[in-house]
Image: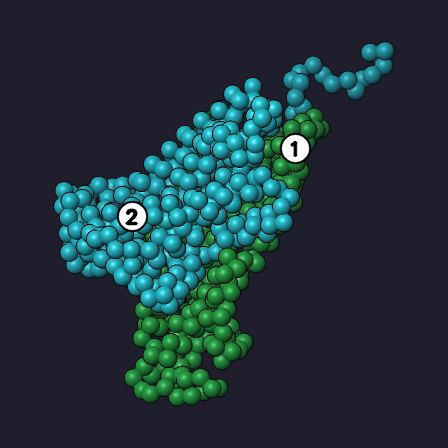
Amino acid sequence: MLIIVAFLVVYAWPVLHMNGWAFLSSNTWNLGNLYSDPITRNGMSVLPGAHYGILFLIVGTLLSTLIAIVLAFPVGVGAAIFLAEGVPASIRTWISFFVELLAAIPSVVFGLWGYVVVIPFLGHTLFPWMSRHLGFLPFFQGPAGSGYGLLTCGFVLGLMIVPLITATVRDALVNQVGNLRDAALALGASRFETLWTVLLPSVRRVLIGSSILAIGRALGETMAVLMISGNALNYLPQNVYAPISTMASFIVSQLDSAMQDPTGLAVRALAEVALVLCAISILVNGFARLLLHYQTRPARGSA
Amino acid sequence: MSASTPTLAPPGPAIPVRSLRRRVVDWMGWGACTLAFLLLGAATVWILTTVVARGMGALSWTIVAHGTTGTGGGLLNAMEGTLVLALGGILLAVPPGLAAGIYLAEFDNGILAPGLRFFADVLVGVPSIVIGYFGYVTMVSTLGWGFSVAAGSISLAIIALPYIARSSEMAIRQVPRDLRDAARALGANDRRVMLGICLPVAMPGILTGVLLALAIAVGETAPLLYTAGWSNFLWTGHLTHEPIGYLTYAIWAFITEPFASAHALAYAAAFFVTLFVLLISVASRLLFDENVSLRRRLKG
């Protein structure tokens, strides 16, 4: 783990040095003229016109993840409540298992499904309809595009992370101590009121922690996004139908071209993308683990 | 006394009648939760039926018996490659993963334990493409192995490692204390307690973790794209300098080709991968249930 980070830093160092903060804030990714002689800039040999900026990747990654979590959170928590409180314990295991199969399906299969089933449906049916009828909302107007894009990514990513939220929250609800529930019921609350006002607040740390873990998963998702995002380059999305590109999928889609760079700088610039992605996911996951750790620690002590 | 208390509740249901508003909110709440669950279930069914229907339609004898030729042919090379890479990755990941699990479970207060546990957790969250990229730059390009089985398997092993470590830690931790004490009372030393008692009892739990890691390894694409490459031919046994095919690549690469034969390969590959991953999930779930009941038996 440390080796990976250290290695990425060392490998990306020349580019880090050259790009500075502009790497994060500028919006042009250009390998430069591959057929001309390298020039020297800041003591490094660079292709003329080469410029590395990944603002559009950061925006694409964050927006698609935001849409994913906004879609996934209510569905995930709702399904968790249904599984924890709405079905008898004897069949709960198997129904939960069925839903959590979603988590086992490989990313690339989600991508395939998105590519052959979801995109034609969204691109030809739902997006034009939304563009016509929801045009009064700020980001829902404008051309409906082809189906490849931000909202499609958000939808498929959301589906991929729902089972994470459902599984964690369901476990937390099932393992909740009975006293709280009994006390609330004895005060005359209905079962749903008990759940809403007593049980859910008591697991709020799990709610937050599991969502952050899910966000971490969505941030780093590669294959599905690669197949359905439209892989936009140097382009900031103007509405929710626009094509995007995320950091993870960009590494895959650009490594081939980056290898053509005789100075080797482009591959190092991709290392910097990987580094930024790695840093974000470590921060996000570390934070989520800390939250979940404090929630589950008493339980672990008694076990 | 009863005559002087006119506020006594009239005879009727023991449960107080709730106001209409509360009942409506109740119904809407349960309705929303049920709807959320149904949405999720429908999506699962939708994906699975898509994969199964299209995959079954694409199956033929050629697919399982021949290698890939351009955008057609079969998937024998890819099936073999997936097995080689995934098994290789798991074989590499089990010894260090198990060792880390034993350490975490037995030396809870060891100097390395908190750091190791934290890094295992964070490593789970590192995007697999980052690990693939790391593998590309280190093994494929710097060490000069080229696209190869070795680079692919090691990348998969890095991904599988934290899963195996954490699940073996959990499994060993849950071995009842009485069993260890009994073994010690009979004069067993640390090594015999671990090898003779703890590991056999924890085995279903450890195997569950290994199976899940295997499922993840089979389903991974991103870390293999730039470490294992792709090959139309069967593996000839070289660890380095020989690219190898695998099923998930076929899904990604062939679905965007404009040929029906390529689509058939992609659907068939998706069918195999999904089938395999689901079988492993069901198997590990059964194993896990057995594990739970075994522990209960030992405790009771």
Secondary structure under badge 1? helix
At x 43%, y 53%, the residue is: B158
Chain B tint as drawn: cyan
Question: Looking at the image, what colour scheme do you see?
Answer: by chain
Which chain is home to disc 1? A
Q: Residues within 10 Å of mark 1 (few under 14, many from 20)?
A: few
Left or right, A77 with respect to B213, comes to right
Chain A tint as drawn: green
Quadrant location, the N terminus of chain B: top right
Disc 1 and disc 2: Cα gap in Å?
43 Å
**Disc 2 residue type?**
Val
Query: Image height check: is A214 above or below A87?
Result: below
- The residue carrying mark 2 is B84
Q: Which mark is residue A111?
A: none
Which chain is home to disc 2? B
Is label 1 or label 2 in front? 2
**Disc 1 residue type?**
Ser
At x 34%, y 41%, the residue is: B277
- The x, y position of residue A95, in whole percent, is 44, 32
At x 31%, y 87%, the residue is: A36
Quadrant location, the C terminus of chain B: top right
At x 54%, y 58%, the residue is: A282
State the image quarter where residue B174 is shown. top right
Left or right, B119 with respect to B290, comes to right
State the image quarter where residue A146 is shown. bottom left
Secondary structure under badge 2? helix
Q: Which mark is residue A302?
A: 1
Left or right, B299 with respect to A257, comes to right
Query: Image height check: is A298 above or below B143?
Result: above
Query: Image height check: is B240 above or below A302?
Result: below
Badge 1 and badge 2 in a common chain: no
